[in-house]
Amino acid sequence: MLKKNVGGIDRVLRIVVGLALIAGFFLNTDATYRWLYLIGIVPLLTGLLSTCPVYSLLGISTCPMKRT
């Protein structure tokens, strides 16, 4: 399984932005660039799964630190 590296506010923002872009796909009537809204799938999935491959490559994590 992938390591979780997206947490809290970052996760909520990704889900909201992803849903907004996908809603734009269905609400936009201009067929020329309508497909660009489908990019919203990426932040939606990374938010729902709490993991981001780009964060993994860069060694970034927005998850809270675990206390020992």
Image (tube, rainbow, N blue to C red):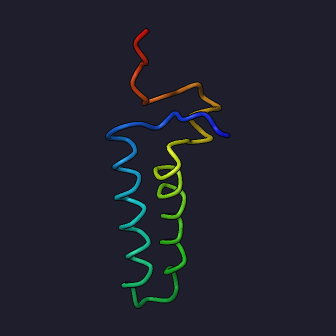
Q: Percent from the top left, x then y, of residue 36?
A: 52, 72
Q: Quadrant of residue 10?
A: top left
Q: Nearer the viewer, residue 50 or 23?
A: 50
Please tell me whether residue 24 is drawn above or below residue 1 in the rendered image: below
Please tell me whether residue 45 is drawn above or below residue 64 in the rendered image: below
Q: Quadrant of the C terminus?
A: top left
Q: Nearer the viewer, residue 65 or 23?
A: 65
Q: Residue at x 62, y 41 (%)?
A: 53
Q: Residue at x 52, y 64 (%)?
A: 41
Q: Percent from the top left, x then y, of residue 19?
A: 39, 66
Q: Quadrant of residue 28?
A: bottom left
Q: Residue at x 51, y 79 (%)?
A: 33
Q: Percent from the top left, x then y, of residue 38?
A: 53, 71
Instruction: Give the side of residue 4 with respect to residue 63, left or right.
Output: right
Query: Furthest residue to the top?
Result: 68
Query: Furthest residue to the front?
Result: 68
Please tell me how many numbered marks the rendered image carries: 0
Instruction: Give the side of residue 6 with respect to residue 52, left or right.
Output: left
Q: Nearer the viewer, residue 38 or 44?
A: 44
Q: Residue at x 60, y 34 (%)?
A: 3
